[in-house]
Amino acid sequence: MEYSVVIHKGEEGGYWVEVPALPGCYSQGETLEETLENVKEAIQLYVEVLSEEGKPPPKDEETVFKISVAI
């Protein structure tokens, strides 16, 4: 199963990431690689809890990315 994630640069360094299809599923890390590994674990745990509760995992809908451009 694949999920889209949105990665944000942290104000004090590092990164934080959210999974739009999984409300409340967030993670963070000092590097992009660490952040992506951490969010994979968060997604696995989120889906595992849903499974234990007898709920199907949500499908990932198309995510539209907002990009800010400084001029």
Image (spheres, grey):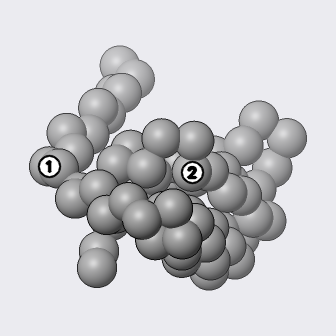
Q: Quadrant of residue 64?
A: top left
**Residue nearest the observer in this picture, 21 or 37:** 21
**Disc ID at residue 62:** 1
Q: Secondary structure at mark 1?
A: loop
The outermost residue toward the front is: 54
Against 2, residue 62 (above or below) is: above
**Disc ID at residue 25:** 2
Q: Earlier in the sequence, mark 1 or mark 2?
A: 2
Q: Residue at x 81, y 49 (%)?
A: 13
Against 63, residue 39 (above or below) is: below
Do the residues under discs 1 and 2 have CB atoms within 8 angstroms?
A: no
Left or right of 5? Residue 36 is right
**Residue nearest the observer in this picture, 31 or 57:** 57
Q: Secondary structure at mark 2?
A: loop
Left or right of 28? Residue 48 is left
Horizontal and vertical percent position of residue 3: 32, 65
Q: Is label 1 or label 2 in front?
A: 2
Task: Say if residue 39 shows up in the picture.
Answer: no
